[in-house]
Amino acid sequence: MFTDRRIERHQLPCFLQVFNRLTDRPIGYLGNVSRDGLMLISQLPMMVGVDFELRLKIPAADGTFHPIDLTASCLWSHEDVNPQHYDSGFSVPQAPEAYGQLIDVLLHYFSFDPLQASA
């Protein structure tokens, strides 16, 4: 069982909704992200060892959404500290370029650079 995190993940204080790409139904919220994976927070546990077709809908300034489609494999799923919620870890082995760009934007947006603060 995969339990050791080898890469830094960034927590998202504001959650982005995650959808089933095939049905366009919401399945949860993005909890954290990394280049190789993500954590989903949902009201139902996810099946471990199964590939999911996911869609992130990234809001644009004009009120539209830009979709990022991913195939992600569920590595683990367990109950969250909040009642009736579950955390599930997914690997994203072949992420599209837009997913990497999203991580870069989120990292920049949620990071605090002390050198810029002193300028």
Image (cartoon, rainbow, N blue to C red):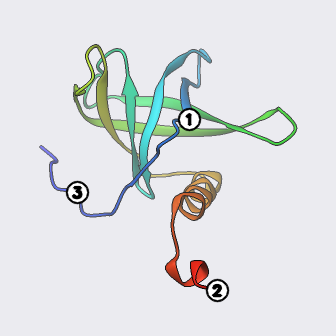
Q: Viewed as shown, does residue 63 lie left or right of 91?
A: right
The residue mark sitting in front, 3 or 2, is 2
Callout 2 amino acid: Ala
For the N terminus, the quadrant is: top left
Q: Residue at x 36, y 15 (%)?
A: 43
Residue 27, percent from left and from top = 47, 20
Could you tell me residue 7's position as x and y percent? 31, 63
Query: For this rendering, which residue is in front, 117 or 49?
Result: 117
Q: Which residue is mark 2?
A: 119
Above or below: residue 32 compared with residue 114? above
Q: Name the N-terminal-most of marks 3 and 2.
A: 3
Q: Around disc 2, counting alpha carbons within 10 Å, would you say few (fewer than 14), some (14 to 19), or many (20 or more)? A: few
As drawn, which residue projects farthest toward the front? 118
Q: Which residue is mark 1?
A: 16
Amino acid at the residue labelled 3: Arg
Distance Cα–Cα, label 2 vs label 1: 32 Å
Mark 1, other Cα within 10 Å: few <14 / some 14–19 / many ≥20: some
Q: Is residue 88 left or right of residue 35?
A: left
Q: Secondary structure at mark 2?
A: loop
Image quadrant assignment for residue 108: bottom right
Farthest-out residue, right:
62
Q: Which mark is residue 75?
A: none
Q: Which of label 2 and label 1 is nearer to you?
A: 2
Q: Nearer the viewer, residue 64 or 47?
A: 64
- Residue 56 locus on image (x, y percent): 60, 35
Residue 49 placed where, x, y %?
26, 32
Q: How many marks?
A: 3
Residue at 33% over, 62% down:
8
Residue marked by disc 3? 5
Q: Is residue 91 above or below residue 103?
A: above
Circle 1: residue type: Leu
